[in-house]
Amino acid sequence: MGPARRRDALRLRGGGSPPLPRLFPGRLSAFPLFLLALLLGFASLLWLQLSCSGEGPVPGGQDRGTPRQPCPPPAPLQPARDEPSWGPHRLALLVPFRERFEELLAFVPYMHRFLSKKKIRHHIFILNQVDHFRFNRASLINVGFLESGNDTDYIAMHDVDLLPLNEHLDYSFPETGPFHVASPELHPLYHYTTYVGGILLLTKQHYELCNGMSNRFWGWGREDDEFYRRIKRAGLQVRRPSGITTGYETFQHLHDPAWRKRDQKRIAAQKQEQFKVDREGGLNNVRYRIESRTDLSVAGAPCTVLNILLDCDTNETPWCMFG
């Protein structure tokens, strides 16, 4: 008996290895394969939605207290710049910035979508301080104002770590005076009556009337308190939101103070100077150079990044230096 016949005989008697099962029939057409792939894709998308939304079982049988993966963000809306129903005004969203990229990646697409849903024509400017001096929020806003172009007619001085959660918040043209979106009754941290930080809207005409912000505030804090006095001196009245019922949950504050320390150091004469009104400086004497200007997209949301080199007169404000 030849080798082939001996193998066949063994198979018939139950000996040897059984043949491998066939997973698919010999002639499987393209349509069932397409249908199977479609069903698998739908099932995976459904599982992703359930697992990231908090519904359904936790993957791997983990405890329900385990944080779930974040849901993928919805596709951003593109602004209809020429849509007549959006109105004639255009907002320059001025965002002072330095080395807070995690917050920036969340901020730009979120704000673009938020403003687009409210039909606010807008342009987001990331004012990135790239020099070696201490952070100067007020000077960066002055630079952003000067560099924002003639196609915008009002500004929002907007912190990168503050996201509006209530869709009823007003970002429209503040014709009658400065509008403080992040009012003390709503801001999660700052509740004193003269507070105008976080998010403040002004027409460009009103900002010029105040001569912008003082350039003397290096490090964190106090520049918005000085700006409140400028607003009053210019004869302007600060308005704030009304009818907002979400209280201190109106905004999401992204800043983690344990991980990212604020530069609150007060050096020499800075301790006394921080409470004074700067009657001379502002838009008229901000000293800077634009190192680069880049238009880019973050998750489909357009913005412009200005890399800004500020200048400091160490005789006037020696506290601009670190150490």
Image (cartoon, rainbow, N blue to C red):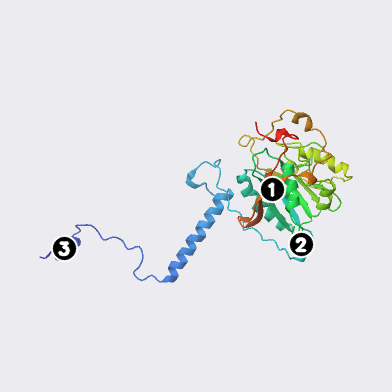
The reply to whether residue 171 is visible in this rendering is no
The kind of residue tagged 3 is: Ala
What is the three-letter code of the residue carrying label 1? Answer: Arg
Q: Which of the labelled discs sits on residue 9, or is there none?
A: 3
Q: Where is the C terminus found, in terms of image quarters?
A: top right
Residue 36 left/right relative to 243: left
Residue 318 vertical position relative to residue 91 in the rendered view, above or below: above
Q: Nearer the viewer, residue 234 or 73?
A: 234
- Residue 180 vs residue 5, the one in the foreground: 180
Quarter assignment of residue 311: top right
Answer with mark 2 or mark 3, whichever residue precedes in sequence.
Answer: 3
Please rate how many residues cluster around mark 1, counting C-alpha atoms within 10 Å: few if below 14, some from 14 to 19, many from 20: few
Residue placed under numbered mark 2 in the picture: 86
Q: Which residue is mark 1?
A: 289
Q: Secondary structure at mark 2?
A: helix
Q: Residue lying farthest left? A: 1
Query: Which sits earlier in the primary sequence, circle 3 or circle 1?
Result: 3
Location of residue 299 in the rendering, given as x and y in whole percent from the top left corner = 60, 55
Foreground label between 2 and 3: 2
Give the CA distance from mark 1 to mark 2.
Answer: 34 Å
The answer to whether residue 52 is seen in the rendering is yes
Three-letter code, disc 2: Trp
* Rendering coords of residue 109 (x, y %): 64, 53
Task: Judge depth for marks 3 and 1 and give the one in front.
Answer: 1
Q: Residue at x 52, y 54 (%)?
A: 47
- Quick one: label 1 or label 2, which is nearer the N terminus? 2
Crowding at mark 3 (Cα within 10 Å: few <14, some 14-19, many 20+): few
Vertical comparison of 317 with 43: above or below: above
Task: For the residues labelled 3 and 1, say whether their Cβ atoms are less than 8 Å apart.
Answer: no
